[in-house]
Amino acid sequence: MKIFALPGNTVLARGISRHLDAELGIFTVHRFPDGESYVRLLCEVKEQQTVIVCTLFQPDDKILPLYYLTKLLKDSGAKSVTLIAPYLAYMRQDKVFNPGEAVTSNYFAALLSSFVDRLITIDPHLHRHGSMSELYAIPCKAIHAAPLVSDWIRQNVVNPIIIGPDSESEQWVSKVAAAAESPFLVLEKVRHSDHEVEVSKPAVAAYHGRTPVLVDDIISTAHTMIETVGHLHVSGMVAPVCIGVHPVFAGNAYDDLVVAGAAQVISCNTIQHPSNRIDVAGLLATAISE
Ligand code: R5P
């Protein structure tokens, strides 16, 4: 087996390869001055299983190099190409919210399914769909970071109260809380626009003296967390720890969240970011080898 890391994925790919004792594939990707991509394979892949690690935040820039590398591996004789996309993009536009909109979840799934053989991802944003097979036509494995998040909380936070910012978060917050042996609350959220969300006030009266830990799958603009941090401050709770599985952090989101009053911002390394404290390499290695 050879593991190929597209740019931005080297640290995680190295971690996975160490767990599996697998070799890293050698190739180059170059962007020409006109913006086109150049890809060159510099190792043998004939009859081998290959794995590409390519997390898919800011996916529009990544999808073509990923497509070219996949095609090249197959044309060079690779037996199979598995994509590890720890963060899987285009999972949120999963229905027509306003007339005339593209359901890009479906289109993106059809596109990826047309060229990779298998997909492994972490906590995909499955809200209105029950499973990946409702979207993807290839074998998919969706693994969960909840046990790792619980471990981190158990080791680092004394007396937590875990808070999920919206009803969608209940699925992972309840698991994280159970394993961390902590109570949890789930709030209600209404999104008005990309940057405008309203989150209900947490009923924390019974939890003063505990440390709030906000847990969400994706932190993008961070407005969901910022709203909740504000409510907690008004309620007189201590500054919360904010944990995101996928640290997308669009624009200044990370700084905004720190300025808003998060005591700590912690993430999984599904996307490389200075807030990474929870390593998913072992989980992914296990998923490949199963
Ligand atoms: C939404 O459904 C997700 O679970 C997250 O709550 C959301 O993506 C967070 O977005 P933002 O950081 O932009 O508020």
Image (cartoon, helix red, strand yellow):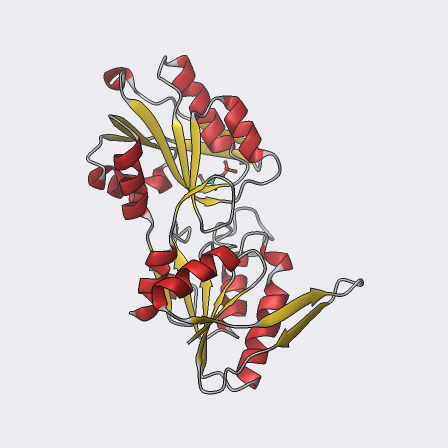
Q: Nearer the viewer, residue 28 or 268?
A: 28
Residue at left offset 27%, top offset 21%: 210
- Left/right placement of residue 35 relative to residue 91 reads right
Q: Position of residue 202 (x, y in %)?
A: 34, 23
Question: On the image, which quarter does residue 253 sit in?
Answer: top right
Q: Position of residue 230 (x, y in %)?
A: 46, 20
Residue at left offset 39%, top offset 33%: 165
Could one spot residue 134 in this view of the protein? no
> Which residue is most to the right?
34
Question: On the image, which quarter does residue 20 sit in?
Answer: bottom left
Q: Nearer the viewer, residue 4 or 221?
A: 4
Whether 124 is drawn above or below 266: the answer is below
Could one spot residue 175 in this view of the protein? yes
Quarter of the image where the N terminus is located: bottom left
Quarter of the image where the C terminus is located: bottom left
Q: Position of residue 136 (x, y in %)?
A: 43, 67
Whether 179 is drawn above or below 81: the answer is above
